[in-house]
Image: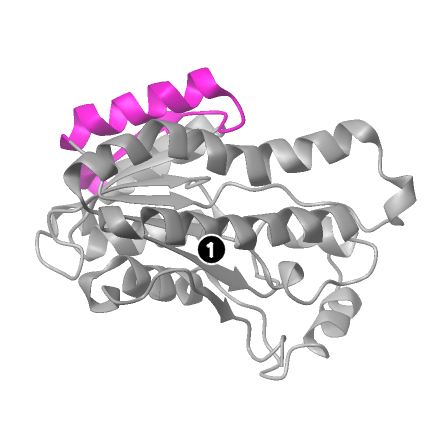
Amino acid sequence: MAGETKNGRLAEKVAIVTGGASGFGAGIATQFVSEGAKVVIADLNSPGAEALAKTLGAQARAVRADVSMDADVKVLAEAAYGFGGRVDILVNNAGVGQGPQPLDGVAEAEFDRLFAVNAKSVFLTARHVVPAMKAAKAGVILNIASTGGVSPRPNLAWYNASKGWMIAATRAMAIELARFGVRVNAINPVAGDTPLLATFMGEDTPEARARILTTIPLRRLSTPDDIAAAAVFLCSDEASMITGVALEVDGGRCL
């Protein structure tokens, strides 16, 4: 069972993965456990998080959390410290998408939700995890942003902006936390074969997928395994000299 793995590039590390019940988050949580980490899977989808944790075994634990709420993030951090004694790695993966529509047609409530989950959550997790990382003079934070924050698609303006904020936050956090030995990086995935895909396309049809593929030089969508492989590297000691980077895992989309 994956949960029994003790060796690997993340051996003995303790990680939080937000939005970990499905999609990229589930891929990251699974690969982290296979590389030896203990992982707290945080998600609003409690049944999904519990099911994945059960599959991964004793090295994983599920916690229900709304990462846009300070009280929930506090409970999440306390659960992680209780599970592993510390937090070595924080992956801010939880995010919401936006249905394609003109920027002036987006409702205020939808805008608020985009920034509460995609941006404010990064602030809240930092509040509850960074102090201990500073004290330990070690730690890694990985933000899952998007190619949309670098090369925006039309009719996804505020989603793109929220991910651009995350990229800027990554760089700002990296320069401030470097003197404490804490590294901060981001990954910019291209459109992925995940539950969020239909949200961005408006409909999940072969025609809609074909249109997206024409914008990706390698002619395929990203997968949870693609993003997880990059996440393992950036969170491992192999990347000990890398901070402030937003790595595009995009099949050439931003070229």
Which amino acid type is marked by label 1?
Answer: Arg
Above-or-below relation of 103 to 74: below
State the scheme by which the image is colored.
one colour
Q: Position of residue 238 (x, y in %)?
A: 21, 68
Q: Main secondary structure of the magenta part?
A: helix
From the image, tell me which residue sits under label 1: 171
Q: Which residues are magenta?
A: 57-85
Tell me which residue sits at (32%, 62%) in the image: 234
Q: Give the number of callouts.
A: 1
Q: Quadrant of the C terminus?
A: bottom right
Q: Position of residue 242 (x, y in %)?
A: 31, 66
Q: Residue furthest top?
A: 71
Pick the residue in front: 137 or 76. 137
Tell me which residue sits at (37%, 66%) in the image: 230
Tell me which residue sits at (73%, 57%) in the image: 204
Pick the residue in front: 7 or 81. 81
State the SS at label 1. Answer: helix
Pick the residue in front: 24 or 151. 151
Left/right placement of residue 251 relative to residue 71 reads: right
Q: Position of residue 54 (x, y in %)?
A: 27, 36
Q: Position of residue 63 (x, y in %)?
A: 35, 26
Above-or-below relation of 246 to 178: below
